[in-house]
Amino acid sequence: MSIQNKDIEHVAKLARLSLSEEEVKMYAEQLSVIFEYMDLLKTVDTDGVAETCQVTGLEDVFRFDTQEPCDPEVRAKLIAGFPDRSGNLLKVKAVFDDV
Amino acid sequence: MRLNELTIAQAAAGLKKREFSSVELTHSCLDRIDARNESIHAFISVNESAIDSAKAADEMLKGGNVHPLTGIPFGVKDAICTKDTRSTGAATILDNYVPPFDATVIRRLRDRGAVIVGKQNCDAFGHGASNENSMYGAVHNPHNEKKVAGGSSGGSAAAVADNQCIFSIAEDTGGSIRQPASLCGVVGLRPSYGRNSRYGIMPMASSLDTVGPITKTVEDAALLMEVMAGQDLKDATTVPDSVDEYSKFLDRPIQGMRVGVPKEYFEHHGIDSEVLTCIRTQLKRLQEMGCELVDISLAHTKYAIPVYYIIVPSEDSSNLARLDGIRYGVRAEADSLYDVYALSRAHGFPSEVKRRIMIGTYALSAGYFDAYYRKAQRVRTLIKQDFETVFENQVDIVVTPTSPFPAFDLGAKADPLSMYLADVFVSPASLAGVPALSVPAGTTTDGLPIGLQIIGPRLSEGIILNVGHQLTAN
């Protein structure tokens, strides 16, 4: 299977990843080879085989949805770790273009 | 013998008898790291407060509040969160990240007075089999510095092999504990999925991630599992089953045990002849100890790598979406929100992390989900059933080489697919969710370690530790 540069550019956009022209070309070539190898799976008959989504057999693991207080020291450290802030608020770029 | 060369059991005995203090023991490890980090590069950060922790442990020891782990210095893979100690995952997007909390398994060790000496180098977020995908430099194998240490937990295995700490705690998704342990000549245990809490482990593939020990002896691994294992309300996938006293399994006779020898591993075209000879010699030893060798087939083994490298990048790409430079870590300067995301990730991830995000996003994208992810999950069932069938009907354990080859040259596997194939013997047990132990089995004529893998049914850690101990202690 051949993956084109435009496919890579589309996927990179979905993944919020900025790639250089060289990287686009490199990943198109590498992913083509990798997915060609993955095509080995197409030769396996899986009719009627269930998917394995987990291996523990645990079902319906519940806990009470309760509010837990945050240790003030932990809170201060979390805030100190913000890349940008205004007082104790996390500062980010505008989410909507037109406001 | 220098203090840093001791095992946990030996160091614990010395501490209890007051032959030395935890401060002295910790200093001996820190001195070794200082002397060797430039050439081996096993540590990304050294814990500045290690000596303070050791002093506190010495107080615990004086008070008679003694656990075998009290005062024992250890290293932690940098993809595991440690309170107040920088945890980068070996990627610069988290270069400044200091978690305000400990992973549950780390908390359990620290509560017993174990002392963190530093955070260990690894392939970024666990992506790799050589430790060359770290943004903080590759780890070099202590047995031959031109060779890789294996990966992704290369720093953790190299540090134990080189006596820079008494033990390490690492993470294994598809072989990241066992393969570097094999290449560095130490013991590495991947527990059953769900046995140990994943809380505080930087997630890679959530349906496969486990956390376990890398040690000098099987005895030490058993001791650590007694403390690490058990249900955790912070990880809903941990199982409620009681935790065995693994140490009590070690000296049990293994006579009569049925040992499966899967032809798909021993007839693998890429296997090194010295590895094959060494593992066959160990199988003979098991036979001499009274085990019965049984030829078995795990028919879907050859599909494990394609299944693994669909499922892992898919889950990876989803998990890594949280690393966007917004709430923590390193944020790139840009004019738009989109560019903040895209550039923070472009600058802060190495090439292999980006490759996995691309593979995973592609496999999960509209039109491809059924053909790749769903198909891989179905073939995963067949791989899991292979193990279930042999454990139900034929054998108690399965023995294989851990890696088809010993440590390879740094830079030798530049092609991503050839690196992925290095996981061929370790990924099947991961997909099946069963526990597997790698123990040192011998060396090549060039002096490179060879590892033997023991795989057991789910929650049979005691049995595989028993066999591993019998093979290595005598």
Image (cartoon, rainbow, N blue to C red):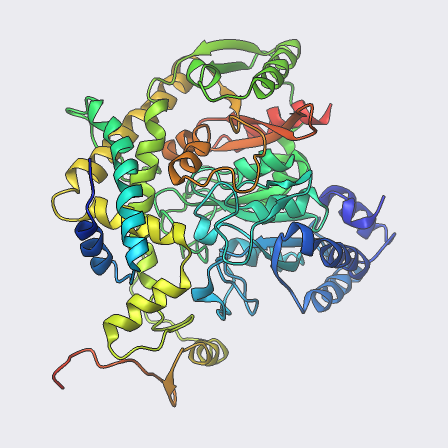
Q: Which residue is drawn at 74% across and 42% down?
A: B9
* Observer-nearest of B223 and B204: B204
Residue at 17%, 36% in the rendered image: B371
Location of residue A63 with respect to B86 vertically, above or below: above
Figure quadrant of residue B222:
top right
Give the position of the N terminus of chain B as an image quadrant: top right
Residue A27 horizontal/vertical position (percent) = 30, 48
Residue drawn where x is 58% and y is 41% of the image: B148
Q: Relative to A59, say whether A76 is above or below.
A: below
* The C terminus of chain B sits in image quarter: top right
User: Toward the viewer: A40 or B429?
Assistant: A40
Vertically, is B327 above or below B248? Answer: below
Q: Can residue A51 be seen in this view?
A: no
Horizontal arrangement in the rendering, residue B268 relative to residue A42 (left or right) = right
Query: Does residue B268 appear to the left or right of B462 in the view shown?
Result: left
Does residue B62 appear to the left or right of B133 in the view shown?
A: right
Tell me where residue B98 appears, x and y as whole percent. Answer: 51, 70
How far across and how far down the image is residue B104, in percent? Answer: 50, 56
